[in-house]
Amino acid sequence: MAPPPHRHLVTGNQLGSIVPTPVYYNKLSKLVLSAEEMKMEGYKVTEIASGDLLRMRRCKLCRKRVTKQKNKKEKKNDSKKDGQDKEKSPADQQTGDRTTLPKSEVDSSQVSPQKDSLSSSGSSDNPPIKYVITIDAETEEVTVHTEPISEEAHAEREKAQNEKVKKKPTCQSHPGRVTYNKWTCCQKPGSSLGCVERDKHEAYDEDSVGRLEDEWKLYETPRFVRGARLAIALDCEMGVTMKGESELIRISAVDYFTGYVLLDTLVYPAVPMLHLNTRYSGVSWQMLNNALATRRCLVSREQARQQLWQFVGPDTIVMAHGGAADLLALRWIHRRMVDTFHVEGTHENPETGRSLKNLAAVRLNRRIQEGRRGHDSIEDAMACRELAHWYLEHLATPATEAAPATS
Ligand SMILES: [Zn+2]
Ligand SMILES: [Zn+2]
């Protein structure tokens, strides 16, 4: 069994405690996301359907999704990219920006027609020509005329064009691992494109629906919890599994009203990991191994979820900043969420950069996520809590409450 979590007052709590008056609690409840808003922000509100599970499969070589999916949530995440690192596809965090890769992720069939159309536009029927533009230095008059291109020059140009097309294979991967931010296969930096190229992705053979269902089974908050708090703030750190998925490696939660730390523990992942995203997560293998050796960590996301559930019942308000990823990493469905990322969007003057770091600076005049250790989930959970409190004090009161009382 896991040891009890540490409970102590964190120096980062600048807010002190908040008195849970009925008026305050009522205002806070108004920030809870509706079912519709939860879906919009990417939260899972039901079990993941088997069709969606199959679409979630990743290539075992490059770890990209095997099926191209540009759904609502992904578009949403694109707009969320502003500084919020964990919104990126997990495999891309260390392996760099893949936006230069072709969007077609199913197979190579989409590459060849493109190639054909390019070479035919190079005119196999008509004689190759080039456009020459001359500008008269005195009159500034522009004239355009055409000149035939030599066969050689034309062939060279066509070859270059074909190479350009060929340069975009569907699947680029590193067969090795990342250690000290270098790939073991080719010694290239962790952010480099794959050293092995293929024109097809390859899904894991063992990814049957049944297995995927086990891997992605989601659990609802238990009905009866003795120590359930009124409200908590939550933040998690994630690494990347060998399959390219996000995996929980640290969990932090604070009581919203008192500011006490309920849980701040490393989570030793129970699945094979590609890397811990140390630059962003602040969690290293040394930290994890030490914690495991001294039995000061939880093991697996299941344990982490159970530990958190000591404080969370169905009525507990859980706040997080872009919390969909945190809840999914915990395989958890909770229906009383306050998402400070979402709340910022409802502000009358919303910030364009909605990262927690930026909002802490702009709204709270507070610096977080400084230094080289990356994110600190307890610091982030504290900042999220203070941000929620800030909104309660600064957001316009809903019209129903602002209406003058009639007598
Ligand atoms: Zn490599
Ligand atoms: Zn691939």
Image (spheres, rainbow, N blue to C red):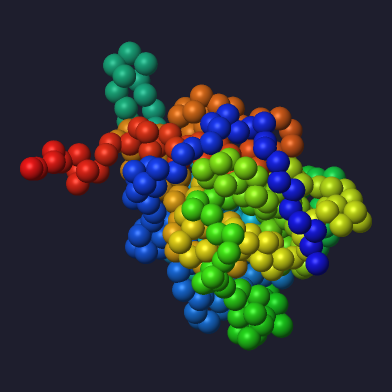
Query: Compared with residue 38, is residue 207 higher up or lower down, i.e. above or below?
Result: below
Between residue 81 and residue 217, name the one nearer to us. Answer: 217
Q: In which quadrant is the N terminus drawn?
A: bottom right
Between residue 69 and residue 314, name the one nearer to us. Answer: 314
Q: Residue 177: where, in percent of width, then height?
A: 82, 57
Residue at point 71%, 46% (across, down): 7
Q: Residue 345: where, in percent of width, then height?
A: 37, 43
* Residue 218 in view in this figure: yes
* Residue 149 in view in this figure: no
**In the image, 42: left or right of 219?**
left
**In the image, 69: left or right of 193?**
left
Residue at point 58%, 64% (across, down): 226
Between residue 98 and residue 163, name the one nearer to us. Answer: 98
Query: Compared with residue 104, is residue 265 higher up or lower down, i.e. above or below?
Result: above
**In the image, 348: left or right of 21?**
left
Q: Residue 174: where, in percent of width, then height?
A: 77, 59
Query: Compared with residue 86, is residue 330 higher up or lower down, i.e. above or below?
Result: below
The residue at the far front in this view is 407
Residue at point 44%, 43% (across, down): 20
Q: In which quadrant is the C terminus drawn?
A: top left
Q: How many marks?
A: 0
Residue 54 falls in image quadrant: bottom right
Query: Compared with residue 366, is residue 127 higher up or lower down, i.e. above or below?
Result: below
Q: Residue 326: where, in percent of width, then height?
A: 58, 56
Residue at point 39%, 37% (across, down): 391
Residue 336 falls in image quadrant: bottom left
